[in-house]
Amino acid sequence: MFENLQEKLEGAFKKLKGQGKITEINVAETLKEIRRALVDADVNYKIAKDFTDNVKTKAMGLGVINAISPGQLMVKIVNDELINLMGGQKSDINLSGNPTIILMSGLQGSGKTTFSGKLANYLKGKGKKPLLTACDVYRPAAINQLHVLGDQLGIPVYSEIENKNPIEIAKNAIKQAKLNNNNVVIIDTAGRLAVDEEMMNEISALKKELNPQEILFVVDSMTGQDAVNTAKAFNDRLDFNGVVLTKLDGDTRGGAALSIMSIVNKPIKFVGTGEKMDAIDVFYPERMAQRILGMGDIVSLVEKAQNAIDEVEAERLAKKLKKSQFDFEDFLSQLAQIKKMGNIKDLLGMIPGVGKAVKDMDISNESFKHTEAMIQSMTPKERKNPDMLDLKRKNRIAKGSGTTLQQVNQLCQQLNQMRTMMKQMNAMQNNPAMKKGMPFAKKR
């Protein structure tokens, strides 16, 4: 996500930082590179030009040329402008109404049905009781898909196989929600082209009849500038409340995320970042701007960790770590917690300075498979007592997990290194001199 844009922006800033003297000429050259980078990322040319014009005005006003760190000041100005370009601040979903009615809209293949499931799962995690409603009466597979997602997530799905009237189905779903105390109704509609007058009239009628609290326009971010043009056409008819960008984990140039707010003046509310049902993020313009500029996104990383890590398990592990009793059972438990947070490469990319380092590395959650297989090939007693692993046992574990003796030895070495590190940390914490923050010195 945004890797190409990030690389080109870094190149533009390097030109400015590398100059012995900062002048209006090399500031203009840097801005030209920034504009080119934005256009290459599929940002509308007029938006890209307005963006660099705003940056130039602010740069000259803040005296970039005479600044002590002109490169850093320019990065800050670009960061601020990127935040403004993407909406300034996050926009919350409107959950008023009893029940709250959320109407999904968009083109075919944009990911509406999948996102409906993700949104329902997200709201369930916030304490809501959602009801998914299948109103795509033209594609039977969409109804089946929604039921599969509902079963997978433990969320009810309302559908009527014989009824081909989406307005009637939606109204009946709302009645059902009131009977079953479902306080959110998410209505998945058919994909439609903005030029298909009959289909656009249908979703306009749905809006008029249901008066939903939220109308979300779901757009595939990989369609680039076309996504922005489609969003405008839909907004002219529906006046939707917000945008959802799907497939941001794919090979996308990011133009839609950077352009859509300027064109339709509606906020991006959510982004889809993967295929799993928990791969949904609230859109924060400030955090996204920082990621585009290679600054990382520590806040989002911490939030993902808080959502994924079991507090009771974390406390139990902390006690074991203090006693340097960390074993393979704990190792396995930690791998499971990390995997729950999402794609490991994306997580690393949220750490400032790390994203660029791992950009070309083949890192995925599949990397954990061999480690898990080795630990699962151990007996419960061996997992809890790693020191009992002799050559015979290690050979058995290697054969059972489809790995080599060398890999088993490496895993044991990693565990020993972690234990040694924990012992050293505990020793430092228990050292009175360290507690005072002073170097330890013997009394003479």
Image (cartoon, grey):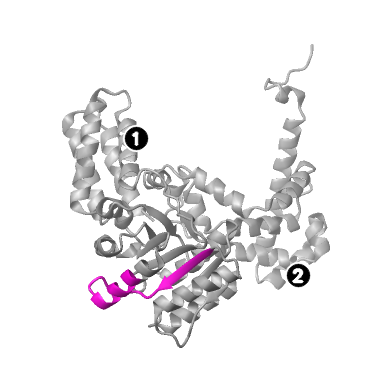
Name which of mark 1 and mark 2 comes first in the sequence.
1
**Farthest residue, direction bottom:** 162
Residue 188 magenta: yes
User: Quadrant where the N terminus lies?
Assistant: bottom left
Answer with left or right where residue 283 lies relative to residue 35: right
Label 1's element?
helix
Residue 20 against residue 340 in the figure, above or below: above
Residue at 42%, 42% (x, y): give it.
295
Highlighted range, magenta: 184-205
Residue 344 against residue 209 in the figure, above or below: above
Q: Name the residue under label 1.
A: 76
Where is residue 442, by image quadrant?
top right
Q: Mark 2 points at which residue?
A: 396
Q: What residue type is labelled 1?
A: Lys
Q: Where does residue 51 sit, x and y in percent of width and height?
A: 23, 43
Residue at 41%, 54% (x, y): give it.
269
Q: Where does residue 22 sit, x and y in percent of width and height?
A: 23, 28
Q: Where does residue 189 sit, x and y in percent of width and height?
A: 40, 73
Residue 441 against residue 220 in the figure, above or below: above
| Mark 1 and mark 2: Cα distance apart in space | 57 Å
